[in-house]
Image: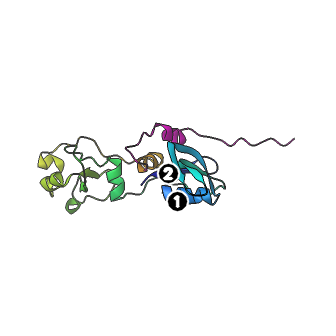
Amino acid sequence: MRQTLVLNAGYEPLSTVTLRRAVVLVMQEKAVVEQEHPGLQLRSAAMELPVPRVIRLRRYVRVPFRQRVPWSRRGVLVRDRHRCVYCGRRATTVDHVVPRSRGGTDTWLNTVAACADDNRRKADRTPAQAGMRLLREPYEPSPAHALLLALDPREDEAPLTSWLSQPRSLSLPLAA
């Protein structure tokens, strides 16, 4: 299912939502479509609506500042784009670089995406002990990067990166 980027009224990225939720927000006039998928339309007997790619809330929503992205198994798979860091094939599991039995924890820097074969082959050892090399080092994604990764990584994301990287400001008319 398509993901839609949600911007606050001040154009700050907030989160991603499903296409269905984005359409509901637009239909309830709680949000406006800022960018649409080219050539795609949602149609009913009474109306047509462009398929939203980016929506902006009409009213400002106050959210607490988040400096770090919480760790999750799904987040690790998305960060590594569902590719095994040992062989490059499709990853379905999460592997601990330092196994949990040896004090390894569930953190961004200690977990990587792995295919089931490589996860079994590495077993309860470190990559050095198993004679395996990491193709990419694990890293902790920034909140903006995690938001971008949450969108479908197979889509052309160049237009969406502009919403995440460039600060925007509202142009308000000056009182006379």
Q: Is residue 174 left or right of residue 61?
A: right
Residue 39 point in image, percent of width and height = 50, 41
103 relative to 156, above or below: below
45 relative to 131, above or below: below
Residue at the image position 54 percent from the left and 47 percent from the top:
54
Which residue has dot 2 on it?
4
Q: Is residue 123 left or right of residue 162?
A: left
Q: Tell how many labels.
A: 2
The CA span between labels 2 and 1 is 9 Å
The mark nearer the N terminus, 2 or 1, is 2
User: Alpha-carbon neighbours of circle 2 within 10 Å: few (<14), some, or many (≥20)?
Assistant: many
Q: Amino acid at mark 2?
A: Thr
Q: In front here: 144 or 97? A: 144
> Do the residues bearing badges 2 and 1 touch, measured as CB atoms within 8 Å?
yes
Q: In front here: 136 or 2? A: 2
The residues colored magenta run 151-176
